[in-house]
Image (spheres, grey):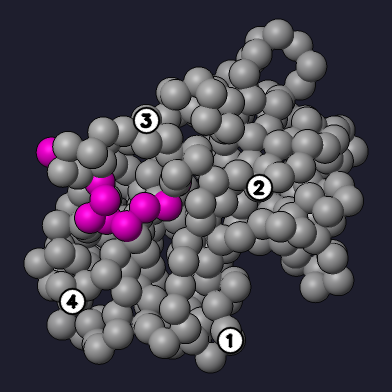
Amino acid sequence: MRVCRAKIDLLQEVQPGAFLLGLAAPGISHEARPGQFYMLKIGEEADPFLPRPFSWLRRGPQASCNGDRVEILFQVVGKGTARLARMPLGEELQVLGPLGRGWEFDTGGFPLLLGGGIGAASLISLLEELPPKLRLDSWALVGARSGNQLWCGEEMSRMGAKVMLASQDGLKGFHGTVLELLKHEQDSLLRAGTEVFACGPWEMLRQVALWASSKGLPCQISVETPMACGVGVCLGCAVRLSGSRGYVRACQEGPVFRAEEIEWD
């Protein structure tokens, strides 16, 4: 984990209201593992006072970045992200990270990636770090409310994965949710060694966890929870464990969990 001042070297709107942010600082992504996240303090003013958590999606694109660069995808949802979207290139942000527990993957399996909305960004870092042959053999299902919000799926396709898209307005890909697409295509997707990796809204994750359990598939999920510190102090990101085992912190013990670890009801 590092605390640094990182310079903005890329800020590009890639779909309506969603921006690709590039940050450069010595060693900023050197220790990053897929599924981990960073806390960004946006501006020096008191409002917004608290930093915000963001998943990272890749170190590059330059292969020679030597861990000195990281890219983050964010959606404008409030005052802080609206300010971030207006920042000029060259501006510096206070960055803390990488933080949390990321994805774990056995190269003997076949990944089935399920992404809902902007949450699919966390799966791009996993896909990027897979061995090239396995990346080409991976399935990724990505859904969004609108067909013009599927940049993550299109990016995964450019990276070589076999991708299916779903949009609830029917503008692109399957007409429906990513979960409906999964159930529609499940017979062609499943094979021995399939492991599910999912990130998106809570209800989507709950339904994916139930589906994976019914199929006997190992499943990891990355939860999206509000958090104020990212280091386990504020307890704002508590997640309830199954079997009356109490609560853990998504920022420290997560955000990636085995699906069976979570109390979904």
Q: In the image, which residues are magenta? A: 255-265
From the image, tell me which residue sits under label 3: 238
Near-viewer residue (186 or 171): 186
Quick one: label 2 or label 1, which is nearer the N terminus? 2
- Give the class, few, some or many, for how many residues have Cα within 10 Å of label 3's Cα (few <14, many ≥20): many
Quick one: label 2 or label 3, which is nearer the N terminus? 2
Near-viewer residue (7 or 163): 7
Q: CA distance from mark 3 to mark 1?
A: 36 Å
Q: Residue at x 37, y 30 (%)?
A: 238
Q: How far from the left and from the top, in percent, is residue 99?
A: 60, 44
Q: CA distance from mark 1 to mark 4?
A: 24 Å
Q: Amino acid at mark 3?
A: Ala
Q: Secondary structure at mark 4?
A: helix
Q: Is residue 45 left or right of residue 117?
A: right
Asked if the magenta segment contains residue 116, the reply would be no
Q: Is residue 85 left or right of residue 251?
A: right
Q: Secondary structure at mark 1?
A: helix
Q: Secondary structure at mark 2?
A: strand
- Give the class, few, some or many, for how many residues have Cα within 10 Å of label 2's Cα (few <14, many ≥20): many
Q: Are marks 2 and 4 in contact (CB under 8 Å)?
A: no
Question: Looking at the picture, does residue 195 appear above or below residue 206?
Answer: below
Quick one: label 3 or label 4, which is nearer the N terminus? 4
Q: Residue at x 36, y 53 (%)?
A: 257
Q: CA distance from mark 3 to mark 4?
A: 32 Å
Quick one: label 3 or label 1, which is nearer the N terminus? 1
Residue 98 is tagged as: 2
Q: CA distance from mark 2 to mark 1?
A: 24 Å
Q: Residue at x 88, y 51 (%)?
A: 26
Q: Amino acid at mark 1?
A: Pro
Q: Secondary structure at mark 3?
A: strand
Residue 186 is tagged as: 4
Q: Amino acid at mark 2?
A: Pro
